[in-house]
Protein backbone atom coordinates (compact mmCIF):
# COMPACT_ATOMS: atom_id res chain seq x y z
CA UNK A 1 0.00 0.00 0.00
CA UNK A 2 1.46 3.35 -1.12
CA UNK A 3 1.89 6.01 1.55
CA UNK A 4 -0.31 9.12 1.27
CA UNK A 5 1.14 11.82 -0.95
CA UNK A 6 2.29 15.01 0.79
CA UNK A 7 0.27 18.21 0.30
CA UNK A 8 2.89 19.72 -2.01
CA UNK A 9 2.56 16.77 -4.40
CA UNK A 10 -1.22 17.11 -4.38
CA UNK A 11 -0.98 20.83 -5.24
CA UNK A 12 1.43 20.02 -8.07
CA UNK A 13 -0.97 17.44 -9.47
CA UNK A 14 -3.83 19.97 -9.24
CA UNK A 15 -1.81 22.58 -11.17
CA UNK A 16 -0.86 19.97 -13.77
CA UNK A 17 -4.50 19.04 -14.24
CA UNK A 18 -5.32 22.71 -14.76
CA UNK A 19 -2.62 23.02 -17.40
CA UNK A 20 -3.81 19.87 -19.11
CA UNK A 21 -7.28 21.36 -19.36
CA UNK A 22 -5.93 24.54 -20.97
CA UNK A 23 -5.84 26.63 -17.76
CA UNK A 24 -2.60 28.37 -16.86
CA UNK A 25 -1.76 29.66 -13.39
CA UNK A 26 -2.19 33.23 -14.68
CA UNK A 27 -5.71 32.41 -15.77
CA UNK A 28 -6.45 30.87 -12.38
CA UNK A 29 -5.32 34.05 -10.62
CA UNK A 30 -7.37 36.24 -12.98
CA UNK A 31 -10.46 34.11 -12.36
CA UNK A 32 -9.97 34.38 -8.60
CA UNK A 33 -9.64 38.16 -8.85
CA UNK A 34 -12.76 38.39 -11.01
CA UNK A 35 -14.75 36.23 -8.59
CA UNK A 36 -13.62 38.42 -5.68
CA UNK A 37 -14.70 41.62 -7.44
CA UNK A 38 -18.09 40.19 -8.43
CA UNK A 39 -18.65 38.95 -4.87
CA UNK A 40 -17.83 42.40 -3.47
CA UNK A 41 -20.25 44.12 -5.87
CA UNK A 42 -23.05 41.66 -5.14
CA UNK A 43 -22.51 41.99 -1.39
CA UNK A 44 -22.52 45.79 -1.57
CA UNK A 45 -25.75 45.80 -3.60
CA UNK A 46 -27.42 43.40 -1.16
CA UNK A 47 -26.35 45.60 1.73
CA UNK A 48 -27.86 48.68 0.07
CA UNK A 49 -31.10 46.89 -0.85
CA UNK A 50 -31.44 45.41 2.63
CA UNK A 51 -31.97 48.88 4.07
CA UNK A 52 -28.76 49.10 6.11
CA UNK A 53 -28.06 52.33 4.25
CA UNK A 54 -30.67 54.84 5.29
CA UNK A 55 -32.12 57.06 2.54
CA UNK A 56 -32.62 60.81 2.85
CA UNK A 57 -36.33 61.71 2.74
CA UNK A 58 -35.56 64.55 0.30
CA UNK A 59 -33.13 62.64 -1.93
CA UNK A 60 -34.50 62.08 -5.43
CA UNK A 61 -31.35 61.98 -7.52
CA UNK A 62 -31.20 58.26 -8.46
CA UNK A 63 -32.29 54.81 -7.22
CA UNK A 64 -28.78 54.15 -5.89
CA UNK A 65 -28.65 57.38 -3.95
CA UNK A 66 -32.06 56.66 -2.45
CA UNK A 67 -30.74 53.40 -0.97
CA UNK A 68 -27.18 54.43 -0.19
CA UNK A 69 -27.66 57.61 1.80
CA UNK A 70 -26.62 57.69 5.41
CA UNK A 71 -28.24 58.82 8.64
CA UNK A 72 -27.77 62.58 9.10
CA UNK A 73 -25.73 64.34 11.72
CA UNK A 74 -27.67 67.41 12.89
CA UNK A 75 -26.09 70.48 14.47
CA UNK A 76 -27.96 73.48 15.89
CA UNK A 77 -26.41 76.93 16.23
CA UNK A 78 -28.32 79.03 18.81
CA UNK A 79 -29.08 82.71 18.43
CA UNK A 80 -28.25 83.34 22.07
CA UNK A 81 -28.80 87.09 22.59
CA UNK A 82 -28.08 88.18 19.01
CA UNK A 83 -30.74 89.84 16.84
CA UNK A 84 -29.25 89.40 13.35
CA UNK A 85 -27.30 86.72 11.56
CA UNK A 86 -24.98 85.84 8.70
CA UNK A 87 -24.93 82.29 7.32
CA UNK A 88 -22.17 81.29 4.89
CA UNK A 89 -22.30 77.86 3.25
CA UNK A 90 -19.47 76.56 1.05
CA UNK A 91 -19.59 73.09 -0.53
CA UNK A 92 -17.19 71.65 -3.08
CA UNK A 93 -19.52 69.09 -4.64
CA UNK A 94 -22.94 67.73 -3.71
CA UNK A 95 -26.47 68.90 -3.07
CA UNK A 96 -27.54 71.77 -0.83
CA UNK A 97 -31.04 72.57 0.36
CA UNK A 98 -31.65 75.76 2.32
CA UNK A 99 -34.99 76.78 3.80
CA UNK A 100 -36.51 78.44 6.84
CA UNK A 101 -38.06 76.65 9.80
CA UNK A 102 -35.04 76.58 12.10
CA UNK A 103 -35.95 76.15 15.78
CA UNK A 104 -37.22 79.37 17.35
CA UNK A 105 -34.07 79.88 19.41
CA UNK A 106 -31.61 78.91 16.65
CA UNK A 107 -29.89 80.91 13.93
CA UNK A 108 -29.26 77.76 11.91
CA UNK A 109 -29.78 74.02 12.05
CA UNK A 110 -27.88 71.82 9.60
CA UNK A 111 -28.29 68.12 8.78
CA UNK A 112 -25.34 66.55 6.97
CA UNK A 113 -25.65 63.14 5.34
CA UNK A 114 -22.28 61.36 5.46
CA UNK A 115 -20.97 57.94 6.53
CA UNK A 116 -18.22 59.03 8.91
CA UNK A 117 -17.68 61.79 11.50
CA UNK A 118 -14.46 62.96 9.84
CA UNK A 119 -16.44 63.86 6.71
CA UNK A 120 -18.50 66.46 8.56
CA UNK A 121 -17.99 70.07 7.43
CA UNK A 122 -16.24 72.66 9.55
CA UNK A 123 -18.62 74.92 11.48
CA UNK A 124 -17.26 78.20 12.79
CA UNK A 125 -19.19 80.84 14.71
CA UNK A 126 -18.40 84.38 15.75
CA UNK A 127 -20.30 87.29 17.29
CA UNK A 128 -19.92 90.96 16.46
CA UNK A 129 -22.17 93.06 18.64
CA UNK A 130 -25.73 91.91 18.05
CA UNK A 131 -24.91 89.78 14.96
CA UNK A 132 -23.82 86.15 14.91
CA UNK A 133 -21.98 84.68 11.91
CA UNK A 134 -21.92 80.98 11.05
CA UNK A 135 -19.56 79.58 8.41
CA UNK A 136 -20.16 76.04 7.18
CA UNK A 137 -17.36 74.75 4.94
CA UNK A 138 -16.67 71.37 3.37
CA UNK A 139 -13.35 69.91 4.48
CA UNK A 140 -12.62 68.38 1.08
CA UNK A 141 -11.70 64.79 0.35
CA UNK A 142 -8.70 64.45 2.70
CA UNK A 143 -8.67 61.13 4.49
CA UNK A 144 -11.62 59.66 2.57
CA UNK A 145 -11.57 56.20 1.07
CA UNK A 146 -11.05 55.70 -2.65
CA UNK A 147 -14.78 55.55 -3.35
CA UNK A 148 -15.61 58.62 -1.25
CA UNK A 149 -15.68 61.11 -4.11
CA UNK A 150 -18.58 59.15 -5.60
CA UNK A 151 -20.53 58.99 -2.34
CA UNK A 152 -23.63 61.15 -1.84
CA UNK A 153 -22.92 64.51 -0.22
CA UNK A 154 -26.07 66.25 0.92
CA UNK A 155 -26.64 69.17 3.28
CA UNK A 156 -30.02 70.34 4.50
CA UNK A 157 -29.85 73.73 6.22
CA UNK A 158 -32.68 75.45 8.07
CA UNK A 159 -32.30 79.17 8.81
CA UNK A 160 -34.00 81.41 11.36
CA UNK A 161 -37.21 83.13 10.30
CA UNK A 162 -37.21 85.49 13.30
CA UNK A 163 -34.15 87.72 12.60
CA UNK A 164 -32.73 89.44 9.48
CA UNK A 165 -30.20 87.16 7.79
CA UNK A 166 -27.37 87.66 5.30
CA UNK A 167 -27.23 84.40 3.35
CA UNK A 168 -24.24 83.31 1.24
CA UNK A 169 -24.35 79.92 -0.54
CA UNK A 170 -21.49 78.69 -2.73
CA UNK A 171 -21.39 75.30 -4.47
CA UNK A 172 -18.57 74.21 -6.78
CA UNK A 173 -20.46 71.41 -8.55
CA UNK A 174 -23.93 70.16 -7.72
CA UNK A 175 -27.54 71.18 -7.36
CA UNK A 176 -28.82 73.91 -5.07
CA UNK A 177 -32.38 74.40 -3.87
CA UNK A 178 -33.17 77.49 -1.81
CA UNK A 179 -36.67 78.05 -0.39
CA UNK A 180 -36.39 81.51 1.13
CA UNK A 181 -39.88 82.98 1.15
CA UNK A 182 -40.24 82.60 4.91
CA UNK A 183 -36.94 84.35 5.74
CA UNK A 184 -36.21 87.99 6.49
CA UNK A 185 -33.36 88.52 4.04
CA UNK A 186 -30.88 91.33 4.55
CA UNK A 187 -28.81 90.14 1.58
CA UNK A 188 -28.43 87.06 -0.61
CA UNK A 189 -25.41 85.74 -2.54
CA UNK A 190 -25.64 82.47 -4.48
CA UNK A 191 -22.82 81.02 -6.57
CA UNK A 192 -22.91 77.68 -8.40
CA UNK A 193 -20.06 76.60 -10.66
CA UNK A 194 -21.76 73.67 -12.39
CA UNK A 195 -25.23 72.35 -11.67
CA UNK A 196 -28.86 73.39 -11.48
CA UNK A 197 -29.98 76.15 -9.13
CA UNK A 198 -33.54 76.70 -7.93
CA UNK A 199 -34.38 79.74 -5.79
CA UNK A 200 -37.90 80.29 -4.48
CA UNK A 201 -38.69 83.62 -2.78
CA UNK A 202 -42.47 83.49 -3.20
CA UNK A 203 -44.73 84.59 -0.32
CA UNK A 204 -41.88 86.80 0.89
CA UNK A 205 -42.84 89.20 3.69
CA UNK A 206 -39.41 90.25 4.97
CA UNK A 207 -37.63 93.55 4.46
CA UNK A 208 -36.12 94.74 1.16
CA UNK A 209 -32.94 92.94 0.13
CA UNK A 210 -30.18 92.90 -2.46
CA UNK A 211 -29.20 89.64 -4.16
CA UNK A 212 -26.36 88.53 -6.42
CA UNK A 213 -26.71 85.21 -8.24
CA UNK A 214 -23.90 83.59 -10.27
CA UNK A 215 -24.64 80.37 -12.16
CA UNK A 216 -21.83 78.98 -14.31
CA UNK A 217 -23.05 75.91 -16.21
CA UNK A 218 -26.56 74.64 -15.54
CA UNK A 219 -30.18 75.73 -15.44
CA UNK A 220 -31.41 78.48 -13.16
CA UNK A 221 -34.97 78.86 -11.88
CA UNK A 222 -35.94 81.94 -9.88
CA UNK A 223 -39.41 82.39 -8.40
CA UNK A 224 -40.29 85.69 -6.75
CA UNK A 225 -43.41 87.07 -5.11
CA UNK A 226 -45.67 88.77 -7.65
CA UNK A 227 -46.71 91.38 -5.06
CA UNK A 228 -43.12 92.34 -4.28
CA UNK A 229 -41.37 95.41 -5.67
CA UNK A 230 -38.59 93.49 -7.38
CA UNK A 231 -36.15 94.36 -10.17
CA UNK A 232 -33.86 91.82 -11.86
CA UNK A 233 -30.83 92.78 -13.92
CA UNK A 234 -29.77 89.94 -16.20
CA UNK A 235 -26.35 89.19 -17.73
CA UNK A 236 -26.87 86.03 -19.76
CA UNK A 237 -24.52 83.93 -21.89
CA UNK A 238 -25.77 80.87 -23.77
CA UNK A 239 -29.30 79.49 -23.30
CA UNK A 240 -32.95 80.44 -23.33
CA UNK A 241 -34.75 82.82 -20.99
CA UNK A 242 -38.41 82.20 -20.23
CA UNK A 243 -40.61 84.35 -18.03
CA UNK A 244 -44.01 84.20 -16.39
CA UNK A 245 -45.68 87.18 -14.74
CA UNK A 246 -42.56 89.29 -15.39
CA UNK A 247 -42.24 92.57 -17.30
CA UNK A 248 -39.12 92.78 -19.49
CA UNK A 249 -37.35 95.93 -20.65
CA UNK A 250 -34.09 95.06 -22.43
CA UNK A 251 -32.01 93.24 -19.78
CA UNK A 252 -34.17 94.38 -16.89
CA UNK A 253 -37.05 92.34 -15.55
CA UNK A 254 -39.55 93.62 -12.98
CA UNK A 255 -42.70 92.58 -11.23
CA UNK A 256 -45.95 94.07 -12.52
CA UNK A 257 -46.59 97.49 -11.00
CA UNK A 258 -42.93 97.99 -10.11
CA UNK A 259 -42.28 101.41 -8.54
CA UNK A 260 -38.63 102.55 -8.24
CA UNK A 261 -39.66 105.18 -5.67
CA UNK A 262 -40.54 102.43 -3.19
CA UNK A 263 -38.10 100.09 -1.39
CA UNK A 264 -36.76 97.66 -4.02
CA UNK A 265 -35.67 94.05 -3.93
CA UNK A 266 -32.69 94.28 -6.30
CA UNK A 267 -31.45 91.03 -7.89
CA UNK A 268 -28.43 90.82 -10.22
CA UNK A 269 -28.04 87.56 -12.18
CA UNK A 270 -25.01 86.36 -14.13
CA UNK A 271 -25.68 83.18 -16.08
CA UNK A 272 -23.01 81.42 -18.15
CA UNK A 273 -24.41 78.41 -20.00
CA UNK A 274 -27.92 77.12 -19.41
CA UNK A 275 -31.54 78.12 -19.45
CA UNK A 276 -33.06 80.71 -17.13
CA UNK A 277 -36.65 80.63 -15.93
CA UNK A 278 -38.07 83.67 -14.14
CA UNK A 279 -41.48 83.43 -12.50
CA UNK A 280 -43.54 85.90 -10.47
CA UNK A 281 -45.99 83.80 -8.45
Image: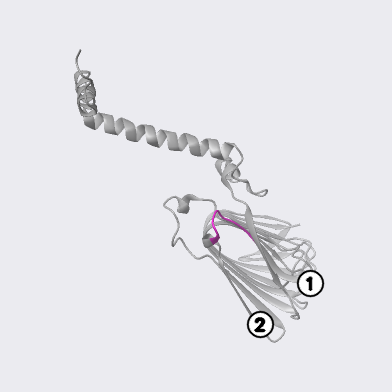
Looking at the image, which residue is at 28% across and 33% down?
29
Circle 1: is it few (<14), some (14-19), or many (20+) Cα within 10 Å?
A: many
- Asked where in the image residue 7 lies, by quadrant, the reply is top left
Q: Position of residue 92 (x, y in %)?
A: 50, 62
Q: Position of residue 183 (x, y in %)?
A: 75, 67
162 versus 193 height, above or below = below
In the rendered view of the protein, which quadrant contains the N terminus?
Answer: top left
The numbered mark at residue 162 is 1
Q: From which residue to which does the magenta span run? A: 111-117
Report if residue 232 is visible in the image.
yes
252 versus 238 height, above or below = below
Residue under label 2, please give it: 127
Q: Is residue 263 left or right of residue 213?
A: right
Of 249 and 135, the residue lying toward us: 135
Q: Position of residue 212 (x, y in %)?
A: 61, 70
Query: What element does badge 2 sit on?
Result: strand
Q: Is residue 233 left or right of residue 203?
A: left
Query: Does the stretch in magenta take in 27?
Result: no
Amino acid sequence: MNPAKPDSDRLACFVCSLNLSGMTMTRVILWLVAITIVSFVIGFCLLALSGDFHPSPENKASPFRQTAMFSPNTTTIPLDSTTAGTVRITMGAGEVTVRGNAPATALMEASVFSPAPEWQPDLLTSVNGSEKTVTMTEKGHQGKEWFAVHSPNSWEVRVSETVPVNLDVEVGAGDSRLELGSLDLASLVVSNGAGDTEIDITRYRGGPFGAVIHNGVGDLTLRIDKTGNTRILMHHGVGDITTSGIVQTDETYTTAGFDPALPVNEIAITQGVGSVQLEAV
